[in-house]
Image: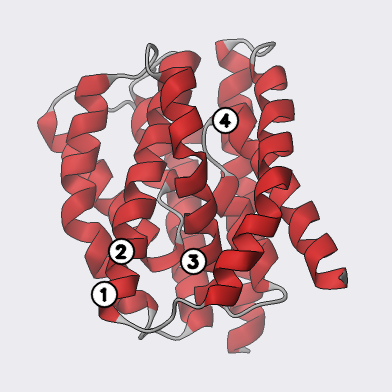
Amino acid sequence: MDDIIVLSAATMAAGFLRGVTGFGFALAAVPLYSLSVPPIQAVVMAQMLQIAAAPTDIVQNRRSVDRKALALLCSGAVICTPVGAFFATRLPADAMRLAIAVVVLMGLLALMAKVTIRDGKGPAITAGAVAGLLGGLAAMPGPPAVAYFLGRGAGKASSRASLLLFFAFTAVIALGSLAIGSDVLRWHMVLAAVAAYPSMLIGSWLGTRLFQRLGDGHYRIAALGVLFFSAVLTGIKGVAGLI
């Protein structure tokens, strides 16, 4: 019972971040889940929950999606997500955490310096490829994709809608790759995800209400804050495991 309560609380918090920014679910959920379950199980559960939320996301956000950018991001992710999933079952967990933290911090510094990203196929496909790699590796495709949209100066509604659908896409590919290439999937993970799903819906609903009150500037600050939180939490756990 205690594990279910902890899982539900972590899922609601992660769902709230997801509702506010369009990302942040796995960035928060995976480190929090990893405090009580092995990292690969945390990754799988986060992916399951993001896939479960996809139908609602499509219905609610289809009019705001940047279809061209989303298609280019997905084309990059479809190549590299299976690669990340392959290494997820073979690399040391703490080394993975530390590497992810470094990548997130680099992206955060670039965004704080207001580095701009030009439109075009190259930047979008590259961002999608790196996001897919991190998505398969640790269910964390957020930083490169978020950096892409914020670096282009895209509006909050378009950014949030496009990110929600992109992450659902990468979760489907990553989970499928894990199912085919390893034996990490277990029924107890499915049951845990089902138990946590209502908490994600509640958290996402609360976050969406806050998102509707944010201006573009406040949305950017919230997005940067989530990236910083995820980098620090993941990095601390990775360093602690390696020492």
Q: Looking at numbered disc 1 in the image, what kind of residue is underneath it?
A: Ile
Quarter of the rendering containing residue 218: top right
Q: Are marks 1 and 4 in contact (CB under 8 Å)?
A: no
Determine whether 179 is above or below 215 in the image: below
Secondary structure under tag 2 reads helix
Density class for disc 2 (Cα within 10 Å; few <14, some 14-19, many ≥20) is some
| Foreground disc of the pair 1, 4 | 1
Q: Looking at numbered disc 2 in the image, what kind of residue is underneath it?
A: Gly
Residue 221 lies, in percent from the top left, at: 62, 27
- Marking on residue 21: 4
Label 3 vs label 2: CA separation? 10 Å
Residue 93 lies, in percent from the top left, at: 50, 81
Q: Are marks 1 and 2 in contact (CB under 8 Å)?
A: yes
Residue at the spot of label 2: 176
Dot 1 or dot 4: first in sequence order is 4
- Position of 97 with respect to 195 (left or right) is left
Residue at the spot of label 1: 180
Secondary structure under tag 4 reads helix
Residue drawn at x 50%, y 66% is: 43
Density class for disc 4 (Cα within 10 Å; few <14, some 14-19, many ≥20) is many
Dot 3 or dot 2: first in sequence order is 3
Residue at the spot of label 3: 44
Residue 32 lies, in percent from the top left, at: 69, 63
Label 1 vs label 4: CA separation? 31 Å
Residue 118 is at least partly visible in this image: no
